[in-house]
Amino acid sequence: MSDKAVPGQFTLVLHSHLPWLAHHGRWPVGEEWLYQSWAASYLPVAEVLRTLAAEGRSHLLSLGITPVLAAQLDDPHSLAGMHHWLGNWQLRADEAAMNGNLTLGRHEHRLAAAALADFEQRWRHGAAPVWRELVDADTIELLGGPLAHPFQPLLDPRLRQFQLTEGLDDAQHRWGHTPTGIWAPECGYTPGMEIGYAAAGVSHFMVDGPALRGDSTLGRPVRESDVVAFGRDLHVSYRVWSPKSGYPGQSAYRDFHHYDHATGLKPARVTGKTVAGPDKAPYDPELAAAAVLRDVDDFVATVRERLISESERIGRPALVVAAFDTELFGHWWHEGPQWLAQVLRALPEAGITVGTLADARERGYVGTPVPLADSSWGSGKDWRVWAGDQVRDLVELNDDIVRLTLDTIDKMRAADGGPALRDHVADQLLREAILTVSSDWAFMVSKDSAAGYARDRAHRHAHAVREIAAAVGAGQVAKAQQLAAGWGSADGLFPGVDARRLARAGSGGSFAAASPPDAAPGSDPALRSTAEGHA
């Protein structure tokens, strides 16, 4: 160790997630959201990780990829749409140059050409090989999760268990690796979930810092289990992603919100938080690059000071976990991938040990058990975003649809005597129920971010469940099969979903049921990046 060595370990966690968007609209909400995030974040972040791996670096970060996002990045329809989108991006850049904005046009053309070449070389037939290469090289720790990102504390235990185990199986199928760590959707937790995690083979998961009463310097075994909860260090995380003082809001960085309406490109830098879009200064890549250097230095100093002070406070080497949505890096913060690459080089140069969550567990950065309580990383750190008055209708819809789905499948099993053959009607009922209860819909409504789209999506999938269940209930076998096939072809995700693996009625699954806590005053000063993009 060098004389600069700092006690403890720093861990960066990235959470990659979008709801299922394929075949559900294009603009202003729909597939465009997927393609923008893919081009601006997933492509460059993967390139950063490959470049660092080629330098001999490993165990760089813990990367969460939700199964529903992974499915889209491997989906033939999405892959074709993305290829077309990248080509169109290059054309829009050329149009900007021809219309007199040479600086913007040339900058965007270089980015688009590089992205298109990267996509055609590495991604054209699916993202699975991209992630698998990074996992196999120990560049990253892969974090998994439930199939379609449900808010687990509110979900029926049987469906909760099914989504988690199927999500982990989906990771094994795509990447040849079953994650032992997960990013719990929305960091949602209620007592008893650790039992289900242990049963599914999950050894560690993420919560927000306040869930550990603000002391996130060590992972903590949850209640009576060996499952460890790691908490996000807000002091360090908010240095990057705070609406008041976070790096992306500084004047030299490209402004996310102001568009050139002729081309859809973003021509301006932030300039000032009170400066109107048309009055913002033109984007200058060199000015932004200098800002990246300053913010890398600031972040490394912040992590170093935090590790030293927290290690002194607890009397042993401390752990600092900074966690963000992957979509922050590139999609929201144009220069984020540049910053990421430089930070991951600069941290070890400053004597800071970098490792994954799995490394932290193996290296003993674990303290005493904690009686973890109801929590999330949403506003107020409780469940108000997914269970508050604004989304009471969605909570009731989810409850009704899950009950109808499980009751219908149970009756189908009873009528058939539990057949060994697969039933595609039951499979499709589960798929539609899983899509109905995605946490994204309530989040988008609570944050007034494309709320109409979110409600439409929830009710569309709920309608599919009701339509199929009604045909089953009426004994219309052929109609039920026809409806299931039609709804299945409309989306085409998770073809491996098999209703035979759903726990039987009365088993209770492996999770404890829960009721939402009363919402308390307060709000989260951090912005959730991905869904906030539609504000």
Image (tube, helix red, strand yellow):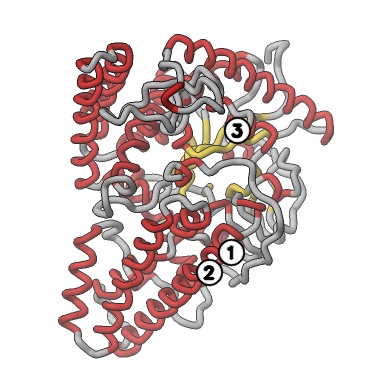
Q: Are marks 1 and 2 in contact (CB under 8 Å)?
A: yes
Q: Element under label 2?
A: helix
Circle 3 sits on which residue? 11
Q: CA distance from mark 2 to mark 3?
A: 37 Å
Left or right, 298 with reference to 137: right
Rounded to the nearest angstrom, the CA distance separating label 3 from label 1 is: 33 Å
* Occupied quadrant, residue 246: top right
Q: Residues within 10 Å of mark 2 (few under 14, many from 20)?
A: few
Image coordinates for residue 162, horizontal then vertical, percent = 44, 66
- Which of marks 1 and 3 precedes in the sequence? 3
The answer to which of 127 and 30 lies nearer the viewer is 30
Q: CA distance from mark 1 to mark 2?
A: 6 Å
Q: Earlier in the sequence, mark 2 or mark 3?
A: 3
How dense is the environment of label 3, judged by Cα within 10 Å: few (below 14), some, or many (20 and up)? many
- Type of amino acid at the residue the image marks with label 1: Gly
**Residue type for callout 2:** Arg
Give the residue at x 53% y 27%.
248
Q: Which residue is mark 2?
A: 392
In what element is the residue under mark 3?
Answer: strand
